[in-house]
Amino acid sequence: MPSDTSTTRTAPLRVALVGYGPAGSFFHAPLIAATPGLVLDTIVTGSQERRAQAGAAHPGVAFAATADELWTRAGELDLVVLASPNRTHVPLATTALQAGLPVVVDKPLAGSAAEARALAALAEARGLLLSVFQNRRWDSDFLTLKALLADRELGEVQRFESRFERWRPQLKGGWRESGDPAEIGGLLYDLGSHLVDQALTLFGPARQVYAESDVRRPGAAADDDSFIAVTHTSGVRSHLWMSATTARLGPRFRVLGSTGGFVTYGLDPQEAALREGLRPGADGPAWGAEPQSAWGTAGTDDDVRTVPSLPGDYPAFYAAIETALREGTAPPVTALEAADALDVIEAAHRSARTGTTVTL
């Protein structure tokens, strides 16, 4: 069981990270290590090459070959983070919760909303934290848009357009491009998890879903060019694009309201910074800041203004996790929120397969 922190308020919470591929090495490990009150205790990987990389980046970290080694020492840990392949999320999260360990799972939490809700029920029954790493809620452009909406700068929002588009005509290989449903691959689950989560966070529950999903690249087996149209119960319509085959990229956001719109291009800089080896805190106070050339614009064609971007803040996720573990408060992203997004993704799969609009 996680340690009683009531008498060890300043002792760091010990985190075990399962998986040291791109998600584990570029996102979770450096963000955990940069969070006051957390310590990266153990990394689970059977790869000697990845152990060498992790040991160099995180001196003193322990290693385990399999997640099973964690369950026998659950009393020495306070949190398990799953950055392993999608197919392992549900079984590993289930075992961790049964061992009495709080869990953070990289998106998507599961392959179905039913599985996500079952995990949420297990966590609640055990009185344990279960959260999902939806880091794009702390993108610079998303935080900027949230502030504009809070100030009603656009009036009543009517349409929300959001894109994660790439130009990758060649396959990278690996399970994400597998057509095996058990792998939970393809862009609807990958980038769609971010796009849908952002739309639901901004504009509330979905009422109807229409989708188009294609496999375009030679040799590909999973969807690599997809579109989702969501009608929210609030009346807002969200149009969401995710693609690996976009030769000319569209705006990241185009938001149209009754008194004005907001348009921004490009991606939040934090992922690129993490991949380059930069770290929050260690690289100065400008973490997550966008250059002025990347700022979006708001208004109308007759009256447009530049909107300074708020800094992106991926470190906020694990800071909130640390607080939730210490104080028993709600996590920054709940499993039930992830289940709502999976309802939309499952509906999108059905819609694309049948050519119909799905009502939730």
Image (tube, helix red, strand yellow):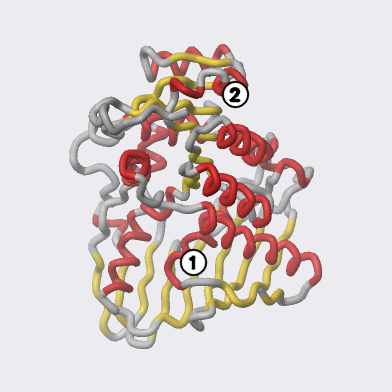
Near-viewer residue (74 or 248): 74
Q: Is residue 165 above or below residue 130?
A: below
Q: Position of residue 280 (x, y in %)?
A: 28, 36
Residue depicted at x 42% and y 68% = 202
Q: Position of residue 285 (x, y in %)?
A: 18, 41
SS type, badge 1: helix
* Amino acid type, residue under disc 2 in the picture: Ala
In this picture, residue 331 sits left or right of residue 285 = right
Q: Earlier in the sequence, mark 1 or mark 2?
A: 2
- Residue 167 visible to the viewer: no
Q: Position of residue 86 (x, y in %)?
A: 64, 40
* Residue at mark 2: 67
Q: Is residue 221 above or below residue 2?
A: below
Near-viewer residue (277 or 9): 9
**In the image, which is nearer the foreground, mark 1 or mark 2?**
2
Q: Position of residue 137 (x, y in %)?
A: 40, 55
In this picture, residue 8 sits left or right of residue 227 = left
Crowd class of label 1 (few under 14; some 14 to 19; many from 20; radius 10 Å): many
